[in-house]
Amino acid sequence: MAHVTVLEEAGSLLVTDVTVGDRAGRAVLVADGRIAWLGDAAEAPPAARVVAGEGALLTPAFVDAHVHATATGLALTGLDLYSSLSLADAVASVRAHAAAVPRGIVLATGWDETGWPEGRGLTRQDLDAVVGDRPAYLARVDVHSATVSTALLDRVPGIAALPGFAPDGRLRLDAHHAARQAAYAAVDVAQRTAAQRATLAAAAALGIGSLHEMAGPEVSGSADLAGLLALAAAGPGPQVLGYWGELSERGGLDVVRELGLAGAGGDLFCDGALGSHTAALSSPYSDRPETAGHLRFETASLVEHVRACTLAGVQAGFHVIGDAAVEQVLTAVGAVVDELGRGAVRACRHRLEHVEMAGPGAVERMRDWGMVASVQPAFDAAWGGDTGMYAARLGADRALATNPFADLADAGVALALGSDAPVTPLDPWGGVHAAVDHHTPASGLRPFDAFDAATHGGWHVVGAEHPQGPLAVGAPADLALWATTDTLSTVLAVRTRPACRLLLVGGAPVTDAP
């Protein structure tokens, strides 16, 4: 932590001798949770506490606009299969974890068979051999498919009749959602709270001052979300803004009202993921021409959801990866624009999550209707390019057109960056750099635009941005002090990931940051 000196006046904190953006020798006074003064360090007013920045870089804190906190924490504290280089390696990791933690459900995430020498993914037979009669749920890296043990299948009556079921335990679509619900229902309160604490601590250490939690009945229950919101509110730590992904006709808006959430949507799964061939495309997959993925809802249900949210003044949100899913949601939004008017829709800033494939006219309609795009640059870094997983699924031409960040930004569509953790790790600087270093250069963002989308953009998405920006007098004091004396321009140019020296959230120091 930075050195703190106590002065006479109470109720304020001064961070002095810092580099703000590209200007050295600056100071920021924080009072009542907001920025009260900003200027040259030599002219700084007195404060109760003084943080000596010693020339370090001070920026707005990051906002991760798409996170699953409990699943992320379970990955941080449990079994992480991202580094598994083969099927045998993954099975050995599961065996060792099951032996080390002899009771309860076995949870893991991150396996990716595309580069494994065995040429296949995990099956329930592989799991049963090492976990025995214990329930086990191993999410694939895209978290839209998983392999489960026989004991977990036995906990889900009727799962064999659901779309996406496979006898070998590799589940997709509705079967996967049902198994995931059963798996996370088996996590007890103590384990869940420990996982959430791990996520908040990891976020704080990375300079993330706010998380958008994408909850829902198919991801995590309302009790999980309520517990996370209470834990975050108790502080000190990152703020959590909650979303609930359930259609209004199924009671989604009721949960939003009961918990005081930021919106009704987020991970409202309109399709799946490219890795598991469940993202909905307008033309078939290149490596599986018999399928173009799946739309999960009738368009009429989406129209009703957008209508209900718009009438209530609530932000709706949708998980859309394939171009057919994007088109379906925009068709629904367009129907509500025709019915209730463009102004009513624009006022809600309805959001699209991922938007990895945008068909003709999609970007323009998003701009015209005031919609926002919550995007994950790490997806392109992990799977983009002409030889990556996207190219295998879509062919090189379609793959290189994915994640059109520049098209969105240049059209005036508001962007917010997120990780979708645990799909990709919490890594805000990495996300900014990935947005700039897109596999398709014309699709990348300008460095300062990427940084703005990773900070101010997260507040704009929820309609809580300060009109003069995140470093203006009166703005919430969500600030990060970094262990570097480089300017922001240099950090962005050199692609460094400085460590967080001090995190302020609402003006309060977060002591979990190293």
Image (cartoon, rainbow, N blue to C red):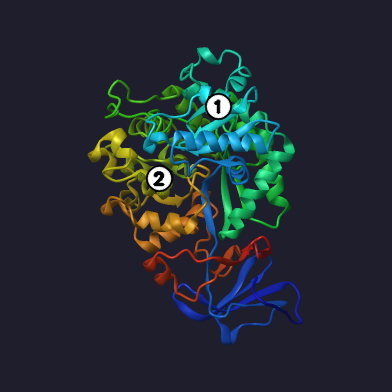
Quarter of the image for residue 314 reads top right
The residue carrying pointer 2 sits among few (fewer than 14), some (14 to 19) or many (20 or more) residues within 10 Å by Cα, namely many
Is tag 1's residue or tag 2's residue first in the polypeptide sequence?
1
Residue 308: mark in rendering = none
Identify residue for label 2: 379
Residue at image position (71%, 47%) is: 231
Estimate the x, y position of residue 338 in percent, counting from the top left. 39, 32
Query: Compared to 263, does 474 lie above or below?
Result: below
Q: CA distance from mark 1 to mark 2?
A: 28 Å
Q: Nearer the viewer, residue 427 or 121?
A: 121
Residues at circles 1 and 2 in contact by the CB criterion of under 8 Å = no
Quarter of the image for residue 373 reads top left
Q: Residue furthest bottom?
A: 42
Is residue 358 at least partly visible in the picture?
no
Identify residue for label 1: 127
Q: Amino acid at mark 1?
A: Leu
Q: Amino acid at mark 2?
A: Phe
Disc 1, SS:
helix
Question: Disc 1 or disc 2, which is closer to the eye?
Answer: 1
Q: Nearer the viewer, residue 224 or 288?
A: 288
Q: Residue furthest left?
A: 397
User: What quarter of the picture does the C terminus occupy?
Assistant: bottom right
Query: Compared to 324, does 54 lie above or below?
Result: below
Estimate the x, y position of residue 284 in percent, counting from the top left. 28, 26
Is residue 360 at least partly visible in the picture?
yes
Query: Compared to 509, does 229 lie above or below?
Result: above
Residue at image position (47%, 55%) is: 457
